[in-house]
């Protein structure tokens, strides 16, 4: 904290604009008005705005500009050159409204700045006519076109905001950036109705601007620093709401009891002996940390992270057996049935050897099988299946693989005031900031290195027109006895059409590029026995190539598969591609991953950055950081339940200082609008994630 008692995170944060004195007191209800109440917003525009998620005045006020255009040079009218973006400043000589065909209108104004006079045209902004009275001072940003000056933005009177630091809102199809800007213009005067939910004491202490001032600063800053100060104020409030909700969850967790599992005993000793290898120091360290948690009666919430192939499953089984040796049950939950089966196959033999009953629960399990499965010592199944399995005899430990819905399992498995210990496993590392945010104090164990040193996968990125080269190389490797995956594009279709697309692609490859090879196809629509058989055949090298949807994303383990081709890779997220790539590079042979994308010009900047990052590194941590940067954390790990996807102004990585500040402040906020907001946010999140 600084001498003024203000935290450095807020250094230089001063109220931006001075508002006109309000004729009436604020009316927050006005913020809930539909956008059709704004002059000039008709049904068509309203519909387009709704597609951006903007339906009320509040939505528009909280619509964050993605960036700002930097200032353009101010130029005398006489010195204007066609096509160059610049600012002119002068006064209105006259302005006329001219009707056009249809219901379109044009405003033609004459502007003079002492050096010359110029014509300025505005289309479809009829209300402007009344504002452009002769003598009005005006600043315009735009360029000289064929019929005069073409303004992109303007300021009237003394304000000097729009023309210099015009906000650029997130791009959307069908709706021009200028329209969004105009709607924000219309909504901004209503910002005076925005109440400030921060406790006055906190606001004074940190000398924070009022929320309404921060909103104005974000949309109409005088300079970039002012925009950032406004954003920081709004980000802080968001983080505070999040942290209040999280603090409450943590408190709830501390109220629940999990069975204390004491120290490892005989079963664990036998497990260690049965393993064909010694655990690595990283695995041992993770186990020590886990044992510490299990000895307590506060439910464990620990994240075990380690890249694919680092040896997490061994640790998972260890934890499950810790439950079993205490006469209780363990459950292993996977995101898909394929993965659940893989896990089951991995651990079943070992369990048998140890005299521990282990059962696989699938959606095709018959009623009797289901009852049997639920009585086993270790139950393996999908997340969804086990979640509905309140019938579990005596669940003490749940291991959750790649689900990224921290806390949810525990919350849904809570009966009365009892909850299981939960170990989350992930190959997609979670930056520390996120771990703190997601579950307040989610503990993290990390397996930093795999048991044996493996060769990193060589990754290349090519565009579609060069895809045939990839297949040429693929056939060469296949001829040498290697196996491969071809991953079909991720299309936003139903599981059924996805399956159909995969089948079609497999058929195409069988006839064309991969004529000489045995091609199988797996997707989510296959019946369990069929899928199991296909996977088994691939594993036994009876198939050379597996065409697949993302069902192979995690867990599939075929060391001889050394090539992966991902079609339309630009459609996948970074974390997802990293996961997919983890299916190769599991044996001693050099592996390759080829990302095929559309032409570079067609890709968004972020898609290009994602693909390049994958080529550049195979370090999961680095990739997670890149992903966090690109996405701001929102969708990164499917962290819907954490409330993170609701952040608009906060950026988890950049706002680390604000986040820490919010964590400190949250426990002191006893009630009031912030707490209500937190309750509301988390109630909604729970409704969605527990559903
Ligand atoms: P992850 O689940 O992290 O992707 P796995 O647990 O599937 O990794 O382990 C990858 C492979 O390494 C498996 O074949 C496993 O048997 C093997 N493995 C695990 N731990 C060790 C170890 N300590 N020494 C040697 N091999 C190991
Ligand atoms: Mg695994």
Image (spheres, grey):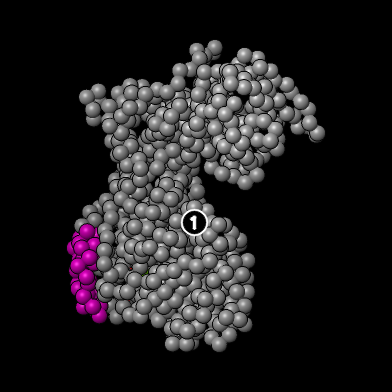
The answer to whether 328 is drawn above or below residue 154 in the figure is: below
Point 37% across, 71% down: residue: 457
Quickly name the residue at label 1.
607
At label 1, counting other C-alpha atoms closer than 10 Å, the crowd grade (few under 14, some 14-19, many 20 or more) is many
Give whichever of 31, 452 is nearer the camera.
452
Give whichever of 35, 509 is nearer the camera.
509
**In the figure, residue 530 lies in which quadrant?**
bottom right
**In the figure, residue 144 lies in which quadrant?**
top right
Point 56% across, 73% down: residue: 526
Where residue 343 appears, as percent x and y from the top left, is 39, 72
Where residue 444 appears, as percent x and y from the top left, is 28, 55
Magenta highlight on residue 231 = no
Magenta highlight on residue 277 = yes
The answer to whether 585 is drawn above or below residue 223 in the figure is: below
Point 36% across, 65% down: residue: 618
Tell me the quadrant of ligand 1. Answer: bottom left
Where residue 480 appears, as percent x and y from the top left, is 44, 87
Give whichever of 347, 369 is nearer the camera.
347
Q: Is residue 455 visible?
A: yes
Q: Is residue 377 visible?
A: no
Residue closest to the far right: 101
Q: Main secondary structure of the magenta part?
A: helix
The answer to whether 691 is drawn above or below residue 157 in the figure is: below
Give whichever of 444, 585 is nearer the camera.
585
Q: Write down the region rendered in magenta.
A: 261-290
Count of all numbered marks drawn on residues in the image: 1
The answer to whether 655 is drawn above or below residue 351 in the figure is: above
Badge 1 element: helix
Point 31% across, 61% down: residue: 305
Q: Please give left or right for residue 160 compared with residue 358 in the image.
A: right
């Amino acid at each position: 904290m600084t001498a003024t008692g203000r935290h450095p995170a807020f250094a230089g944060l001063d109220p931006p604009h001075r508002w006109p004195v309000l004729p009436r007191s604020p009316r927050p209800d006005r913020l809930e008005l539909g956008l059709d109440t704004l002059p000039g917003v008709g049904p068509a525009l309203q519909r387009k705005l709704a597609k951006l998620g903007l339906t009320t005045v509040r939505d528009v006020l909280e619509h964050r500009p993605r960036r700002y255009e930097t200032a353009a040079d101010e130029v005398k009218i006489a010195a204007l050159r066609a096509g160059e973006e610049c600012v002119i400043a002068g006064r209105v000589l006259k302005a006329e409204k001219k009707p056009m065909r249809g219901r379109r209108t044009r405003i033609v104004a004459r502007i003079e700045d002492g050096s010359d006079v110029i014509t300025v045209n505005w289309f479809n902004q009829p209300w402007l006519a009344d504002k452009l009275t002769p003598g009005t001072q005006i600043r315009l940003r735009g360029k000289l076109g064929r019929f005069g000056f073409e303004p992109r933005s303007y300021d009237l009177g003394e304000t000097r905001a729009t023309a210099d630091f015009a906000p650029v809102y997130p791009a959307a199809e069908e709706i021009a950036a200028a329209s969004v800007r105009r709607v924000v213009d219309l909504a901004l005067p209503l910002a005076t109705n925005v109440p400030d939910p921060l406790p006055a004491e906190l606001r004074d202490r940190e000398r924070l601007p009022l929320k309404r001032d921060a909103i104005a600063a974000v949309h109409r800053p005088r300079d970039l620093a002012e925009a950032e100060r406004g954003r920081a104020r709004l980000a802080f409030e968001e983080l505070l709401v999040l942290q209040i909700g999280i603090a409450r969850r943590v408190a709830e967790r501390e109220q629940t009891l999990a069975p204390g599992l004491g120290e490892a005993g005989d079963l664990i000793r036998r497990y260690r002996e049965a393993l064909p290898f010694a655990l690595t120091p990283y695995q041992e360290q993770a186990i020590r940390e886990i044992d510490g948690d299990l000895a307590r009666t506060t439910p464990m919430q620990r994240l075990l992270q380690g890249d694919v192939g680092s040896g997490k499953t061994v640790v998972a089984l260890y934890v499950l057996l810790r439950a079993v040796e205490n006469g209780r049950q363990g459950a292993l939950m996977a995101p898909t049935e394929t993965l659940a089966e893989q896990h089951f196959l991995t651990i079943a033999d070992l369990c048998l050897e140890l005299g521990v009953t282990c059962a696989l629960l699938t959606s095709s399990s018959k009623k009797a099988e289901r009852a049997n499965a639920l009585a086993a010592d270790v139950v393996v199944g999908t997340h969804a299946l086990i979640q509905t399995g309140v019938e579990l005899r005596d669940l003490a430990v749940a291991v959750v693989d790649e689900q990224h819905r921290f806390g949810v399992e525990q919350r849904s498995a809570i009966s009365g005031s009892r909850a299981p210990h939960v170990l989350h496993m992930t190959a997609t590392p979670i930056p520390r900031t996120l771990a703190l945010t997601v579950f307040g104090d989610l503990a993290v164990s990390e397996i930093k290195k795999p048991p044996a040193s493996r060769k990193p996968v060589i990754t290349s990125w090519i565009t579609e027109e060069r895809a045939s080269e990839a297949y040429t190389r693929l056939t060469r490797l296949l001829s040498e006895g290697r196996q491969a995956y071809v991953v079909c594009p991720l299309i936003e279709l139903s599981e059924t059409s996805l399956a159909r697309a995969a089948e079609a692609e497999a058929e195409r490859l069988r006839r064309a590029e991969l004529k000489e090879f045995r091609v199988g196809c797996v997707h989510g629509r296959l019946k369990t026995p069929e899928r199991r058989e296909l996977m088994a055949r691939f594993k036994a090298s009876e198939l050379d190539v597996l065409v697949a949807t993302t069902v192979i994303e995690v867990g599939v383990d075929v060391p001889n598969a050394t090539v992966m081709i991902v079609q339309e890779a630009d459609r996948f997220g970074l974390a997802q591609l990293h996961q997919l790539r983890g299916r190769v590079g599991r044996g001693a042979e050099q592996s390759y991953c080829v990302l095929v994308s559309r032409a570079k010009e067609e890709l968004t900047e972020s898609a290009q950055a994602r693909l390049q990052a994958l080529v550049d590194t195979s370090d999961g941590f680095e990739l997670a950081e890149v992903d966090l940067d690109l996405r701001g954390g929102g969708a990164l790990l499917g962290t819907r339940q954490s409330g993170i996807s609701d952040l608009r102004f906060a950026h988890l990585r950049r706002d680390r200082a604000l986040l820490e500040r919010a964590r400190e402040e949250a426990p002191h906020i006893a009630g009031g609008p912030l707490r209500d907001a937190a309750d509301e946010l988390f109630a909604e999140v729970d409704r969605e994630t527990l559903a």
